[in-house]
């Protein structure tokens, strides 16, 4: 196995490096993020790439970035950027005239300093794949933000690899589908795809993202349901409003009684304020009267998630509900806050947003198929879902991280509200199983079983990319058990993790291929 810290595969390319003003650092950096430039790899461990015009002297780095040579030396001495020789190899001591630095790395570090995020920068991480400076609205473009999901990667990461290793028409698999980011991005890039997930609700999110809609009808239905729930909410608060259209003969107290009788979940009764519970149950009652029922469920699920009796700063992993009207010091808003006591506020916020996002994706999507399979990737028979004779060109996926997330529990509100069947026992590496040696061993065997199974449907020269936080160094053994060879290991910084804090975090992207001996 060759471990490469800064690999960018492909052919050598040449480009001119022009001096840039200090204010242009952010622009240069954003261009590098989406550049299709392909650079030559080395077989030995390197800090950057050989024969790359990105390697510059300290004087050149200072001139281009608007810093002094002393500044650049200080960054090197403090371990902020790597000290390289003229061939791009990391060195401890340079001969006269041989010291070089990576211009991309310097620019990435300086941008982080300007954003006070320099703690995220470590020499040895790929300069493009941190996506420094990429705005949140771009990280969650169009349908990628239809519904929150812990542990998903950003679409730009998928795009970066699909651009460099695959072409239009190639079949892509994600055996850990999650919320469908890989399939959405593959479709946008003209690549047919298939994804598998053990969670029915995860598959539901992905299907809604990838669905085709009559946009005018979808907008009409979404806004009509919102309007009806708003009128119902007004009645709850004794505001003057006409009778409810769908149930004109019901008095409000009788309607409330009937709606609450439909709620069999103790969780829903405990984690939501009375009016919030009524509003979301009323919305659920309306759904069967419309065509785009799955879309409406996703809007409601997103609104329900944000309407629980919890702190504003802990939507991802709340431990217990807060009493209605109880105040707390909110770290998000830096003032005293109270938990939300209604659901209509979030229904209103997410209805128009959802319509806008599906319309944006509709302009970008291709006609390539995107197949969603609710199943277990350790045993799923992909040939029953793929067109006859199709073999996969590649895999891009991010498996669960051992002992980090309980994937069913993160959406417990949706399972309780809609009655989706749960399959917790089949999760791989759930948080509830911990991170013990026994848990790690089970994880290794399960992940290896997945790739042994799906590689049967992969072309002989198929490429597998696995995004993982391999803190326990498990993936070399996983590859061995799965009959795969790790061709490259690429390191990247993970920044701006929504609802997961802002501490430095590192991921590995393993580039694997089938072991020819198997």
Image (cartoon, helix red, strand yellow):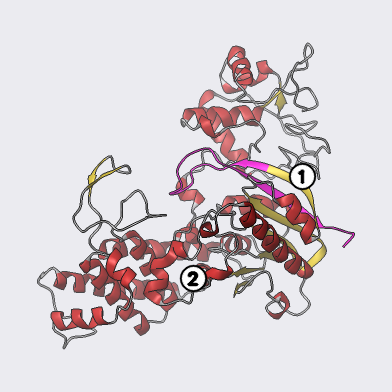
- Residue 203 in picture, x, y percent from top left: 53, 71
In the image, what residue occupies the spot 55% across and 30% down?
A: 25
Label 2: few (<14), some or many (≥20) within 10 Å? Answer: many
Helix or strand or loop: what does disc 2 sit on? Answer: helix
Helix or strand or loop: what does disc 1 sit on? Answer: loop
Pick whichever, 132 or 76, lies toward us: 76
Pick whichever, 36 or 293, lies toward us: 293
Quadrant occupied by the N terminus: top right
In the image, which disc is placed on residue 201?
2
Callout 1 touching callout 2 (CB < 8 Å): no
Is residue 245 visible in the rendered image? The answer is no
Which residue range is magenta in the image? 491-518
- Residue 354 in picture, x, y percent from top left: 40, 64
Indicate the quadrant where residue 321 lies: bottom left
Please, is residue 434 above or below residue 389 in the view?
Answer: above
Q: Please check the rendered image and state whether residue 67 is part of the magenta-colored stretch, yes or no.
A: no
The Cα atoms of the two marked residues, 1 and 2, are separated by 37 Å
Please, is residue 375 above or below residue 322 in the view?
Answer: below
In the image, what residue occupies the spot 48% across and 74% down?
A: 213
Q: Please check the rendered image and state whether residue 496 is part of the magenta-colored stretch, yes or no.
A: yes
In the image, what residue occupies the spot 44% across and 59% down?
A: 148
In the image, which disc is placed on residue 9?
1
Is residue 270 visible in the rendered image? The answer is yes
1 vs 2, front mark: 2
Please, is residue 328 above or below residue 308 in the view?
Answer: above
Q: Earlier in the sequence, mark 1 or mark 2?
A: 1
């Amino acid at each position: 196995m060759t471990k490469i810290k800064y690999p960018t595969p492909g052919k050598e390319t040449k480009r001119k490096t022009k001096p840039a003003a200090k204010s242009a650092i952010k622009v240069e950096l954003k261009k590098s993020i989406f550049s299709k430039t392909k650079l030559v790899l080395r077989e030995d461990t390197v800090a950057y790439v050989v024969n790359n015009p990105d390697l510059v002297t300290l004087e050149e780095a200072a001139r281009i970035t608007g810093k002094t040579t002393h500044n650049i030396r200080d960054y090197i001495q403090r371990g902020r950027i790597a000290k390289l020789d003229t061939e791009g190899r990391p060195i401890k001591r340079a001969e006269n005239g041989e010291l070089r630095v990576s211009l991309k790395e310097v620019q990435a570090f300086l941008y982080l300093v300007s954003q006070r995020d320099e703690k995220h920068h470590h020499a040895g991480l790929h300069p493009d794949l941190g996506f420094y400076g990429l705005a949140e609205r771009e990280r969650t473009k169009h349908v990628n933000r239809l519904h929150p999901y812990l542990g998903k990667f950003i679409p730009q990461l998928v795009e970066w690899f699909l651009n460099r290793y695959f072409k239009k028409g190639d079949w892509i698999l994600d055996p850990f589908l999650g919320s469908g980011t890989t399939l959405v991005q593959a479709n946008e890039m003209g690549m047919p795809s298939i994804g598998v997930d053990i969670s029915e609700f995860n598959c539901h999110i992905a299907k809604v993202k990838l669905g085709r809609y009559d946009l005018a009808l979808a907008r009409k239905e979404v806004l009509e349901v919102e309007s009806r729930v708003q009128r119902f909410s007004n009645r709850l608060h004794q505001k003057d409003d006409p009778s409810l259209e769908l149930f004109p003969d019901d008095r409000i107290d009788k309607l409330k009684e009937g709606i609450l009788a439909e709620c069999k979940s103790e969780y829903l009764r405990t984690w939501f304020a009375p009016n919030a519970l009524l509003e979301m149950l009323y919305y659920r009652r309306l759904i069967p009267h419309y065509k785009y029922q799955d879309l409406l469920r996703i809007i409601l699920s997103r609104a329900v998630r944000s309407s629980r009796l919890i702190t504003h700063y802990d939507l991802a992993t709340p431990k217990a509900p807060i009493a209605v009207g109880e105040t707390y010091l909110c770290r998000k808003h830096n003032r005293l806050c109270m938990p939300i006591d209604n659901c209509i506020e979030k229904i209103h916020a997410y209805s128009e947003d959802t319509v806008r996002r599906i319309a944006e994706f509709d302009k970008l999507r291709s006609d390539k198929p995107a197949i969603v399979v609710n199943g277990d990737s350790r045993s799923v028979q992909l040939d029953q879902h793929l067109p006859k004779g199709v073999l996969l060109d590649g895999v891009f996926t991010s498996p669960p991280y051992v002992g980090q997330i309980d994937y069913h529990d993160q959406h417990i509100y949706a399972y309780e509200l809609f009655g989706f069947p749960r399959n917790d026992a089949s999760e791989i590496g759930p948080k509830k199983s911990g991170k013990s040696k026994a848990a790690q061993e089970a994880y290794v065997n399960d992940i290896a079983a997945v790739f042994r199974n799906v590689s049967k449907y992969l072309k002989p020269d198929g490429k597998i990319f696995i995004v993982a936080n391999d803190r326990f160094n498990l993936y070399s053994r996983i590859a061995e058990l799965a009959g795969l060879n790790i061709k490259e290991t690429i390191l990247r910084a993970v920044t701006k993790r929504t609802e997961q804090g802002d501490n430095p975090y590192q991921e590995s992207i393993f580039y694997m291929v089938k072991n020819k001996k198997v």
